[in-house]
Image: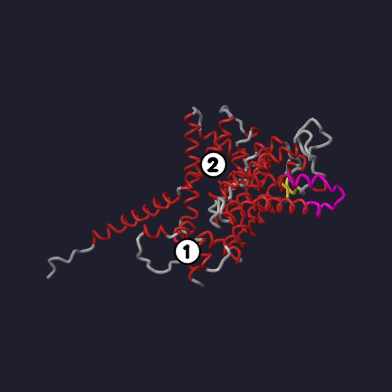
Amino acid sequence: MTLLEDELEGHPLGGEEESDQAALRSPARLTAFRRGSGAITVPVLTTVIAFLAGGLIVLASGHDPVSTYTSIFTGTGLNWLFPWIGGAARATAAGNLQQTLLQATPLILVGLAVAFAFRAGMFNIGGQGQYTVGGIVAVWIGSSFAGMSPVLHIAFAIVAAGLAGAAWAGIAGVLKAVTGANEVISTIMLNWIAIWLGVYCFQLGGPLQNPKMPQTPVSSNVVAGAKLPVFWGSAQLQGLDVGIFIAFALAVVFAILIKRTRFGYEARAVGFNPEAARYAGMNVGRTWVRVMLVCGAFAGVAASLDILGWKFNLYTNDIQVSQVGFYGIAVALLGRNSASGTVAAAVLFGALLTGTSDRNIHLSIDPTLVQYLTFMIEGIIIMLVATDVITLRLLKGGRRIAVALRSRPAKAARPSGHGAS
């Protein structure tokens, strides 16, 4: 293994006695600690703090946070996993859990779209735009080619949506590689361009508006042959479709790509230090472009799974209010930019979105406040994860204190040796 590979994997390169302050200045060692002892502790602690803070807000509004969270948990359908839930309650829980997993499916992929960029030292804030462009292409292809074979039609729509998302994200990659443009700015601008492009396409008289509904700003409906098969629940009641398996498969692809391929190695190397990677002979600009292409493809596929799985059309209002791409940022941060962590974080946010929806809130508390809990928890998670160095410091400090307390009795019992004859 080369010296650079040692650094990328976070293995100590010597000087184990170096100070903690110096160790934290090493990106590789900080990353190693984040992915090692802090890989699980920090996300769990972050989530607990976020929920506690949300509970305090509910308490300050004069309501019971325990009953609020209990109602939200029941609405997520996760109680279906408890064997003692039966009868009508189990059937309701199954339906809610299907909705949770439907919400989690695109979040997995937009989370991966953000996570891959983070691993390469880039900030892909354009997941929403890439998702929107993918949705436009998916609904256009899904509502056309009615005579095509269902399998080919579904594959065509998914691949085309992924390519559209990749092309949209590739614009930001090319701008960064060629002109040095900051990808944060360019992806934010591309978000708005994509949103208003979608509004234009499906507005009254727009080129892709449904001709059968001339007074409604909506796309044509996806034909029956392009809809994803439902394997759990009723297709008429938004049962869970096979898109969840596509999302899981792409999470595996992400893990293999980032850890087991030359491209993934180069992306991580560029993320650690672009100048060192360039000195080592890597084409940094090309890596940036390729990374953004992959990110956009993930987001584009996410939109296609929503369109072909349960939405089946696009309204201009849906395009303007959608927050899926922005949730992907929180999902990636909470998931530590790893495949398994991103999947777990996506399920958590999917559960929050389902549990706080109008149909699942049965409390005297204002449903709007409960729905805003998702945004509040998301914001707290982003804030805490963004300052996780502080959390890691506290964890390490707590360990030192625990070690000192355990060793103190032993030192006290040890004879001093003075006065022995």
Q: Main secondary structure of the magenta part?
A: helix
Picture coordinates of residue 345 (x, y %)? 57, 48
Residue, x 52% and y 41% (percent of image)? 379
Q: How is the image coloured?
A: secondary structure
Question: For mark 1, does the 10 Å Cα neighbourhood hold few (<14), some (14 to 19), or many (20 or more) residues?
Answer: some
- Looking at the rendered image, the quarter that the C terminus falls into is bottom left
- Asked if the stretch drawn in magenta spans residue 226, the answer is no
Q: Position of residue 242 (x, y in %)?
A: 73, 51
Q: Residue at x 73, y 36 (%)?
A: 315
Specify which label sits upstream in the sequence, 1 or 2: 1
Picture coordinates of residue 143, whole percent (x, y): 81, 44
* Amino acid at circle 1: Gly
Name the residue nearer the viewer: 180 or 376.
Answer: 180
In the image, is 292 to the left or to the right of 226?
left
Residue 379 can be seen, yes or no:
yes
User: Is residue 153 part of the magenta span, yes or no?
Assistant: yes
SS of the residue under disc 1: loop
Residue annotated with mark 2: 378
- Report the magenta residues as a range: 136-154
Q: How many marks?
A: 2
In terms of secondary structure, where does tag 2 sit? helix
Q: Identify residue type, mark 2.
A: Glu
Residue of label 1:
10
Q: Is residue 290 above or below residue 43?
A: below
